[in-house]
Image (cartoon, rainbow, N blue to C red):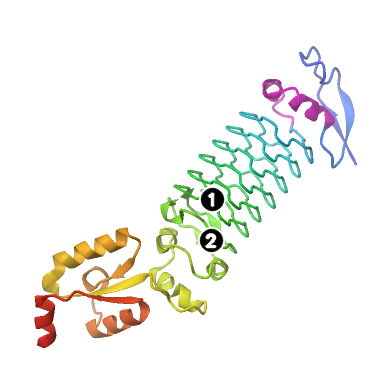
Protein backbone atom coordinates (compact mmCIF):
# COMPACT_ATOMS: atom_id res chain seq x y z
CA UNK A 1 0.00 0.00 0.00
CA UNK A 2 1.32 3.44 -0.96
CA UNK A 3 0.22 6.98 -0.18
CA UNK A 4 -0.17 9.78 -2.69
CA UNK A 5 -1.10 13.46 -2.48
CA UNK A 6 -4.01 14.44 -4.75
CA UNK A 7 -4.06 18.16 -5.77
CA UNK A 8 -6.78 20.38 -4.31
CA UNK A 9 -9.67 21.34 -6.58
CA UNK A 10 -11.21 24.37 -4.85
CA UNK A 11 -14.25 25.81 -6.67
CA UNK A 12 -14.29 22.83 -8.97
CA UNK A 13 -17.56 22.67 -10.98
CA UNK A 14 -17.84 18.92 -10.46
CA UNK A 15 -19.00 18.25 -6.86
CA UNK A 16 -18.04 14.60 -6.97
CA UNK A 17 -14.38 15.55 -7.16
CA UNK A 18 -12.07 16.79 -4.46
CA UNK A 19 -12.79 19.94 -2.43
CA UNK A 20 -9.46 20.13 -0.67
CA UNK A 21 -6.03 18.61 -0.73
CA UNK A 22 -6.06 15.23 0.90
CA UNK A 23 -4.09 12.03 1.18
CA UNK A 24 -5.57 8.93 -0.41
CA UNK A 25 -4.55 5.33 -0.35
CA UNK A 26 -3.19 3.99 -3.62
CA UNK A 27 -3.20 0.23 -4.06
CA UNK A 28 -3.79 -2.18 -6.88
CA UNK A 29 -7.41 -1.11 -7.37
CA UNK A 30 -8.84 1.67 -9.52
CA UNK A 31 -9.10 5.18 -8.09
CA UNK A 32 -12.75 5.47 -7.02
CA UNK A 33 -12.86 9.21 -7.71
CA UNK A 34 -11.63 8.66 -11.26
CA UNK A 35 -14.31 6.02 -11.79
CA UNK A 36 -16.98 8.47 -10.57
CA UNK A 37 -15.81 11.08 -13.05
CA UNK A 38 -15.80 8.80 -16.09
CA UNK A 39 -19.29 7.56 -15.24
CA UNK A 40 -20.57 11.15 -15.46
CA UNK A 41 -19.94 11.10 -19.20
CA UNK A 42 -17.20 11.84 -21.69
CA UNK A 43 -17.77 15.61 -21.72
CA UNK A 44 -17.16 15.80 -17.98
CA UNK A 45 -14.22 13.39 -18.20
CA UNK A 46 -12.45 15.22 -20.99
CA UNK A 47 -12.93 18.58 -19.28
CA UNK A 48 -11.35 17.15 -16.13
CA UNK A 49 -8.43 15.78 -18.15
CA UNK A 50 -7.82 19.22 -19.64
CA UNK A 51 -7.93 20.88 -16.22
CA UNK A 52 -5.61 18.38 -14.52
CA UNK A 53 -3.31 16.97 -17.25
CA UNK A 54 -0.70 15.94 -14.68
CA UNK A 55 -3.05 13.38 -13.09
CA UNK A 56 -2.67 9.86 -14.49
CA UNK A 57 -6.13 8.24 -14.51
CA UNK A 58 -6.41 4.91 -12.75
CA UNK A 59 -9.31 2.76 -13.96
CA UNK A 60 -7.78 -0.66 -13.44
CA UNK A 61 -9.95 -3.78 -13.37
CA UNK A 62 -13.21 -1.82 -13.70
CA UNK A 63 -16.19 -3.16 -15.61
CA UNK A 64 -17.06 -0.81 -18.50
CA UNK A 65 -18.65 -3.41 -20.77
CA UNK A 66 -20.88 -1.77 -23.38
CA UNK A 67 -19.88 1.79 -22.46
CA UNK A 68 -19.80 4.66 -24.98
CA UNK A 69 -16.31 6.21 -24.77
CA UNK A 70 -16.25 7.86 -28.19
CA UNK A 71 -13.53 10.52 -28.28
CA UNK A 72 -12.48 9.89 -24.66
CA UNK A 73 -9.07 11.09 -23.50
CA UNK A 74 -7.40 8.04 -21.97
CA UNK A 75 -3.84 9.15 -22.67
CA UNK A 76 -1.46 7.61 -20.08
CA UNK A 77 -4.44 5.99 -18.33
CA UNK A 78 -4.13 2.79 -16.32
CA UNK A 79 -6.77 0.50 -17.77
CA UNK A 80 -4.97 -2.80 -17.28
CA UNK A 81 -7.37 -5.62 -16.53
CA UNK A 82 -10.44 -3.49 -17.34
CA UNK A 83 -13.47 -5.07 -19.01
CA UNK A 84 -14.33 -3.13 -22.16
CA UNK A 85 -16.18 -5.77 -24.18
CA UNK A 86 -18.61 -4.27 -26.73
CA UNK A 87 -17.33 -0.82 -25.78
CA UNK A 88 -17.26 2.06 -28.28
CA UNK A 89 -13.88 3.82 -28.27
CA UNK A 90 -14.11 5.34 -31.73
CA UNK A 91 -11.65 8.22 -32.06
CA UNK A 92 -10.46 7.79 -28.46
CA UNK A 93 -6.97 8.81 -27.34
CA UNK A 94 -5.01 6.00 -25.69
CA UNK A 95 -1.42 7.18 -26.16
CA UNK A 96 0.95 5.49 -23.69
CA UNK A 97 -2.01 3.87 -21.92
CA UNK A 98 -1.52 0.65 -19.96
CA UNK A 99 -4.02 -1.75 -21.54
CA UNK A 100 -2.36 -5.00 -20.55
CA UNK A 101 -4.73 -7.93 -19.99
CA UNK A 102 -7.72 -5.75 -20.93
CA UNK A 103 -10.83 -7.35 -22.47
CA UNK A 104 -11.89 -5.52 -25.65
CA UNK A 105 -13.87 -8.20 -27.45
CA UNK A 106 -16.02 -6.75 -30.22
CA UNK A 107 -14.96 -3.24 -29.20
CA UNK A 108 -15.09 -0.41 -31.74
CA UNK A 109 -11.63 1.21 -31.90
CA UNK A 110 -11.96 2.79 -35.33
CA UNK A 111 -9.80 5.90 -35.77
CA UNK A 112 -8.51 5.53 -32.20
CA UNK A 113 -5.03 6.82 -31.38
CA UNK A 114 -3.27 3.87 -29.73
CA UNK A 115 0.36 4.91 -30.15
CA UNK A 116 2.82 3.34 -27.72
CA UNK A 117 -0.01 1.74 -25.72
CA UNK A 118 0.76 -1.52 -23.94
CA UNK A 119 -1.77 -4.16 -25.00
CA UNK A 120 0.23 -7.19 -23.89
CA UNK A 121 -1.98 -10.20 -23.16
CA UNK A 122 -5.11 -8.22 -24.10
CA UNK A 123 -8.09 -9.76 -25.90
CA UNK A 124 -9.45 -8.04 -29.02
CA UNK A 125 -11.42 -10.89 -30.60
CA UNK A 126 -13.88 -9.45 -33.10
CA UNK A 127 -12.75 -5.86 -32.46
CA UNK A 128 -12.78 -3.10 -35.10
CA UNK A 129 -9.59 -1.08 -35.64
CA UNK A 130 -10.25 0.58 -39.01
CA UNK A 131 -7.90 3.58 -39.44
CA UNK A 132 -6.57 3.22 -35.89
CA UNK A 133 -3.00 4.29 -35.11
CA UNK A 134 -1.18 1.39 -33.42
CA UNK A 135 2.34 2.60 -34.16
CA UNK A 136 4.89 1.43 -31.58
CA UNK A 137 2.12 -0.34 -29.64
CA UNK A 138 2.99 -3.45 -27.62
CA UNK A 139 0.58 -6.09 -28.92
CA UNK A 140 2.57 -9.10 -27.76
CA UNK A 141 0.39 -12.05 -26.90
CA UNK A 142 -2.86 -10.23 -27.73
CA UNK A 143 -5.96 -12.10 -28.84
CA UNK A 144 -6.86 -10.55 -32.21
CA UNK A 145 -8.83 -13.41 -33.72
CA UNK A 146 -11.37 -12.11 -36.28
CA UNK A 147 -10.32 -8.51 -35.52
CA UNK A 148 -10.59 -5.98 -38.33
CA UNK A 149 -7.23 -4.20 -38.68
CA UNK A 150 -7.98 -2.66 -42.06
CA UNK A 151 -6.11 0.59 -42.75
CA UNK A 152 -4.40 0.50 -39.36
CA UNK A 153 -0.94 1.95 -38.81
CA UNK A 154 1.20 -0.88 -37.40
CA UNK A 155 4.50 0.93 -37.88
CA UNK A 156 6.89 -0.29 -35.19
CA UNK A 157 4.21 -2.39 -33.45
CA UNK A 158 5.20 -5.57 -31.62
CA UNK A 159 2.89 -8.46 -32.57
CA UNK A 160 5.02 -11.22 -31.06
CA UNK A 161 2.96 -14.31 -30.16
CA UNK A 162 -0.29 -12.55 -31.09
CA UNK A 163 -3.32 -14.68 -32.00
CA UNK A 164 -4.43 -13.55 -35.47
CA UNK A 165 -6.75 -16.31 -36.63
CA UNK A 166 -9.15 -14.78 -39.16
CA UNK A 167 -7.87 -11.23 -38.58
CA UNK A 168 -8.26 -8.83 -41.52
CA UNK A 169 -5.25 -6.73 -42.61
CA UNK A 170 -6.69 -4.93 -45.66
CA UNK A 171 -4.37 -2.03 -46.56
CA UNK A 172 -2.72 -2.07 -43.13
CA UNK A 173 0.59 -0.18 -42.98
CA UNK A 174 3.70 -1.86 -41.63
CA UNK A 175 7.38 -1.10 -41.24
CA UNK A 176 9.77 -2.28 -38.53
CA UNK A 177 6.78 -4.30 -37.32
CA UNK A 178 7.57 -7.49 -35.39
CA UNK A 179 5.80 -10.64 -36.63
CA UNK A 180 7.50 -13.29 -34.52
CA UNK A 181 6.02 -16.59 -33.28
CA UNK A 182 2.73 -15.96 -35.13
CA UNK A 183 0.54 -18.20 -37.28
CA UNK A 184 -0.20 -16.03 -40.33
CA UNK A 185 -1.73 -18.63 -42.61
CA UNK A 186 -5.34 -17.66 -41.84
CA UNK A 187 -4.82 -13.88 -41.78
CA UNK A 188 -6.90 -12.19 -44.48
CA UNK A 189 -5.69 -9.71 -47.10
CA UNK A 190 -1.98 -9.91 -46.27
CA UNK A 191 -1.32 -9.30 -49.95
CA UNK A 192 -2.74 -5.79 -49.62
CA UNK A 193 -0.47 -4.73 -46.74
CA UNK A 194 1.50 -1.55 -47.48
CA UNK A 195 5.13 -2.00 -46.47
CA UNK A 196 6.71 1.34 -45.58
CA UNK A 197 9.88 -0.33 -44.35
CA UNK A 198 11.24 -3.80 -43.56
CA UNK A 199 9.65 -5.89 -40.82
CA UNK A 200 10.78 -8.81 -38.70
CA UNK A 201 9.39 -12.19 -39.83
CA UNK A 202 10.60 -14.87 -37.43
CA UNK A 203 11.58 -18.37 -38.51
CA UNK A 204 9.09 -19.47 -35.85
CA UNK A 205 6.40 -17.60 -37.78
CA UNK A 206 7.29 -19.46 -40.99
CA UNK A 207 7.08 -22.76 -39.10
CA UNK A 208 3.81 -22.00 -37.30
CA UNK A 209 2.29 -20.82 -40.60
CA UNK A 210 3.46 -24.02 -42.35
CA UNK A 211 5.13 -21.73 -44.87
CA UNK A 212 1.66 -20.67 -46.07
CA UNK A 213 2.24 -16.91 -46.20
CA UNK A 214 1.71 -14.86 -49.38
CA UNK A 215 5.08 -14.38 -51.08
CA UNK A 216 4.21 -10.76 -51.85
CA UNK A 217 3.83 -10.06 -48.11
CA UNK A 218 7.15 -11.72 -47.28
CA UNK A 219 8.90 -9.91 -50.10
CA UNK A 220 7.48 -6.56 -49.00
CA UNK A 221 8.68 -7.22 -45.46
CA UNK A 222 12.21 -7.69 -46.76
CA UNK A 223 12.50 -11.48 -46.71
CA UNK A 224 15.11 -12.56 -49.30
CA UNK A 225 13.79 -14.24 -52.44
CA UNK A 226 15.94 -17.31 -51.78
CA UNK A 227 14.28 -17.90 -48.41
CA UNK A 228 10.81 -17.33 -49.85
CA UNK A 229 11.50 -19.86 -52.62
CA UNK A 230 12.69 -22.55 -50.24
CA UNK A 231 10.45 -21.70 -47.24
CA UNK A 232 8.04 -24.61 -47.54
CA UNK A 233 10.64 -27.25 -48.28
CA UNK A 234 12.83 -25.97 -45.41
CA UNK A 235 10.10 -26.84 -42.90
CA UNK A 236 9.58 -30.34 -44.25
CA UNK A 237 6.76 -29.77 -46.70
CA UNK A 238 6.95 -30.38 -50.41
CA UNK A 239 6.69 -27.22 -52.41
CA UNK A 240 3.08 -26.89 -53.54
CA UNK A 241 1.95 -25.69 -56.94
CA UNK A 242 2.09 -21.95 -56.56
CA UNK A 243 5.18 -20.93 -58.58
CA UNK A 244 6.13 -21.23 -62.22
CA UNK A 245 9.27 -21.25 -64.38
CA UNK A 246 8.82 -19.96 -67.94
CA UNK A 247 11.00 -21.40 -70.67
CA UNK A 248 10.86 -19.68 -74.06
CA UNK A 249 12.82 -18.62 -77.09
CA UNK A 250 14.40 -15.18 -76.96
CA UNK A 251 12.52 -14.43 -80.18
CA UNK A 252 9.27 -14.70 -78.17
CA UNK A 253 10.43 -12.07 -75.67
CA UNK A 254 7.40 -9.77 -75.97
CA UNK A 255 4.92 -12.62 -75.54
CA UNK A 256 6.85 -14.04 -72.57
CA UNK A 257 6.90 -10.65 -70.84
CA UNK A 258 3.14 -10.26 -71.23
CA UNK A 259 2.60 -13.79 -69.92
CA UNK A 260 4.93 -13.11 -66.97
CA UNK A 261 3.10 -9.89 -66.06
CA UNK A 262 -0.32 -11.56 -66.23
CA UNK A 263 0.76 -14.45 -64.01
CA UNK A 264 2.36 -12.12 -61.48
CA UNK A 265 -0.85 -10.06 -61.31
CA UNK A 266 -2.73 -13.26 -60.51
CA UNK A 267 -0.39 -14.00 -57.62
CA UNK A 268 1.66 -16.70 -59.37
CA UNK A 269 5.37 -16.20 -58.75
CA UNK A 270 7.28 -16.60 -61.99
CA UNK A 271 10.87 -16.81 -63.15
CA UNK A 272 12.31 -16.36 -66.59
CA UNK A 273 15.85 -15.76 -67.72
CA UNK A 274 15.87 -12.09 -68.87
CA UNK A 275 14.28 -10.93 -65.60
CA UNK A 276 16.18 -13.03 -63.09
CA UNK A 277 19.33 -14.32 -64.75
CA UNK A 278 22.46 -12.85 -63.20
CA UNK A 279 25.54 -11.99 -65.22
CA UNK A 280 27.87 -14.99 -65.21
CA UNK A 281 25.13 -17.55 -64.57
CA UNK A 282 25.46 -20.72 -66.62
CA UNK A 283 22.20 -20.99 -68.52
CA UNK A 284 21.71 -24.78 -68.29
CA UNK A 285 22.72 -24.93 -64.61
CA UNK A 286 20.37 -22.06 -63.77
CA UNK A 287 17.50 -23.65 -65.68
CA UNK A 288 18.03 -27.05 -64.03
CA UNK A 289 18.08 -25.38 -60.61
CA UNK A 290 14.91 -23.46 -61.37
CA UNK A 291 13.07 -26.58 -62.48
CA UNK A 292 13.89 -28.16 -59.11
CA UNK A 293 12.80 -25.10 -57.13
CA UNK A 294 9.63 -24.13 -58.94
CA UNK A 295 6.44 -26.17 -59.09
CA UNK A 296 5.61 -25.86 -62.77
CA UNK A 297 7.63 -25.60 -65.95
CA UNK A 298 5.70 -23.55 -68.50
CA UNK A 299 7.11 -24.10 -71.97
CA UNK A 300 6.24 -21.52 -74.59
CA UNK A 301 5.99 -23.83 -77.56
CA UNK A 302 6.25 -21.71 -80.68
CA UNK A 303 7.82 -21.99 -84.12
CA UNK A 304 10.90 -20.24 -82.76
CA UNK A 305 11.31 -22.57 -79.79
CA UNK A 306 10.73 -25.68 -81.89
CA UNK A 307 13.42 -24.56 -84.30
CA UNK A 308 15.75 -23.81 -81.38
CA UNK A 309 15.22 -27.28 -79.87
CA UNK A 310 15.88 -28.84 -83.26
CA UNK A 311 19.29 -27.24 -83.56
Residue 196 location in percent, x, y?
43, 50
Q: Which stretch is magenta?
A: 32-55
Is disc 1 surrounded by few (<14), some (14 to 19) or many (20+) residues within 10 Å?
many
C-alpha distance separating marks 2 and 1: 18 Å
- Label 1 secondary element: loop
- Whether residue 278 is visible, yes or no, is no
- For label 2, the residue is 184
**Looking at the image, residue 170 lies above or below residue 65:** below
- 259 vs 16, nearest the viewer: 259
User: Number of labelled discs?
Assistant: 2
In primary-sequence order, the first of circles 2 and 1 is 1
Q: Quadrant of residue 17?
A: top right
User: Is residue 217 found left or right of 311 in the rendered image?
Assistant: right
Q: Quadrant of residue 220?
A: bottom left
Q: Residue at x 68, y 51 (%)?
A: 120
- Whether residue 67 is visible, yes or no, is yes
Is disc 2 surrounded by few (<14), some (14 to 19) or many (20+) residues within 10 Å?
many
- 256 vs 181, nearest the viewer: 256
Residue 274 location in percent, x, y?
21, 70
- For label 1, the residue is 156
- Label 2 secondary element: loop
- Look at the image and tell me in which quarter the C terminus lies: bottom left
- Look at the image and tell me in which quarter the N terminus lies: top right
* Circles 2 and 1 in contact, beta carbons < 8 Å: no
Q: Residue at x 13, y 70 (%)?
A: 252
User: Is residue 26 found left or right of 125 in the rendered image?
Assistant: right
Residue 32 numbered tag: none
Residue 235 location in percent, x, y?
52, 77
Q: Quadrant of residue 299?
A: bottom left
**Looking at the image, residue 138 lies above or below residue 18:** below
Mark 2 or 1, closer to the camera? 2
Residue 151 location in percent, x, y?
48, 43
Amino acid sequence: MKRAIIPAMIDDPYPLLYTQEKTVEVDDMANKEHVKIIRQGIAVWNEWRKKYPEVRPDLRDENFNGADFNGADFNRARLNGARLNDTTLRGAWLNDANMSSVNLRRADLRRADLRRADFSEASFSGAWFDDADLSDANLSGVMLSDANLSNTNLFGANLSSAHLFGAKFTNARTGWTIFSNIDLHSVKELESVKHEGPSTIGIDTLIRSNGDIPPSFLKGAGVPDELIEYARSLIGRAIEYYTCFISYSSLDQNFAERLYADLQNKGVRCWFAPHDMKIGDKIRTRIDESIRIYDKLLLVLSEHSVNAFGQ
